[in-house]
Amino acid sequence: MKILGIETSCDETAAAVVEDGRITLSNIVSSQVDIHARYGGIVPEVASRQHMLTILPVVEQAVSQAEVTWKGIGAVAVTYGPGLSGSLLVGVNVAKALALTYALPLIGINHLEAHIYANWLNGKDILFPCLCLIVSGGHSDLVLMVGHGKYSRIGRTRDDAAGEAFDKGARILSLGYPGGPVIEATARDVVPTIALPRAWLRGSNDFSFSGLKTALLHLVRARESLDHFWVTDAAASYQQAIVEVLASKTIAVARALDVKEILLSGGVAANSALRDQFIRRSPLPVIIPPPSLCTDNAAMVAACGYYRFQSGHIDCCELDVVPGLGIS
Ligand code: KG4
Ligand code: ZN
């Protein structure tokens, strides 16, 4: 079964065709990053307008690159939350129109679940129960998954998400936007020497990154100027503090719960220091999508849609956006 996935929850306009939830036939992502970079962050109004301009060509390209006709598509899956309401509305309404036009089932997808399902596009079989770490711009969730569509969130961030911490840290260091990739590039091959705090929150599976961000801000304010060597050290030290907490806590929880595997997902999972840390330290198998499937894309939406469809979930044209949707 070939599913068309549509993703417009934030600043990527994306469409993809995936077969049987595992084989990517096409995966088109049109990024707005250059448009928002001049503002130092995403401007919601600009994002939704840009989605409107781009969505139809992106869908057309995904279908033609997959070498299918509309008759060959079995369903349309679309992200309905969480995300920016104006952006979500564009994807959901286009998906509804396509489902009506071609008489296809419509499947509403939780963006956080979709991030987890990027791991099914990896070619490896996933074993349940597994522990999923979703680290994106808006979320840092630890989710126990016992079967398809069966989740319980057992940890979350109490303040900033990991991606948000990267973005704010980059702004404090005047490195630009988006913060994750630029901190990773600045920190590459640099040995971190600056002591920064880690919020271990012992006895809890939660995370906290706002204290780390404030500590970096105080260090920057105490300096007369930001020379290149100090900034690279600060970027590497800051990255290490985030990565160490994410890896140590996730691995400890996975061992305590005796899960079979750890699944990473979300934009921050593209970070090579995070990937290395997990692979080096985890006694359990760690599954990580390739970087292009960690950041927002529609192949993960289509993969998730396949498993949701298999378990009998179909939505109707009443489907509405839920900007504050969580995973439970
Ligand atoms: O999953 P995603 O593409 O969108 C959301 O659902 O939020 O994640 C975006 C976040 C941003 O905060 C970005 O800075 C971060 O992921 N990110 C990274 C890297 N690439 C993207 N963080 C650290 N290292 C990276 N290489
Ligand atoms: Zn995302």
Image (spheres, helix red, strand yellow):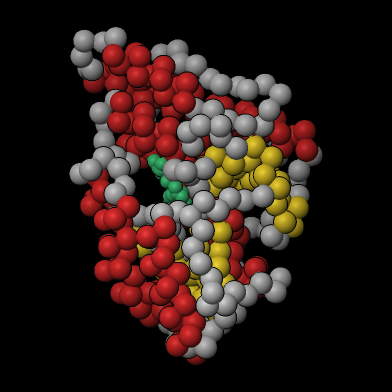
Q: Looking at the figure, which quarter contains the N terminus?
A: bottom right
Image coords of residue 22 (percent x, y): 59, 67
Q: Going 44% across and 43% down the picture, which residue do you hit?
A: 137
Total labels: the figure holds 0
Q: Residue at x 60, y 37 (%)?
A: 156
Query: Closer to the camera, 293 or 164?
Result: 164
Q: Position of residue 50 (x, y in %)?
A: 27, 62
Question: Is any atom of residue 287 visible in this view?
Answer: no
Q: Is residue 291 above or below residue 3?
A: above
Q: Is residue 109 above or below residue 251?
A: below
Q: Is residue 169 left or right of residue 203?
A: left
- Give the residue drawn at x 29%, y 21%: 231
Front-most of residues 254 and 98: 98
Residue beneath the point at 63% across and 22% down? 201
**95 on left or right of 219:** right
Q: Is residue 219 visible?
A: yes
Q: Quadrant of residue 56?
A: bottom left
- In the image, 257 versus 201, the foreground residue is 201
In the image, residue 216 lies at what x, y percent?
A: 38, 19
In the displayed structure image, the side of residue 180 where residue 108 appears, left or right: right
Left or right, 268 with respect to 130, comes to left
Vertical arrangement, residue 158 with respect to residue 309, above or below: above
Q: Nearer the viewer, residue 227 or 54?
A: 54
Whole-percent x, y for residue 3 in the image: 53, 75
Q: Give the quarter of the image for residue 6.
A: bottom left
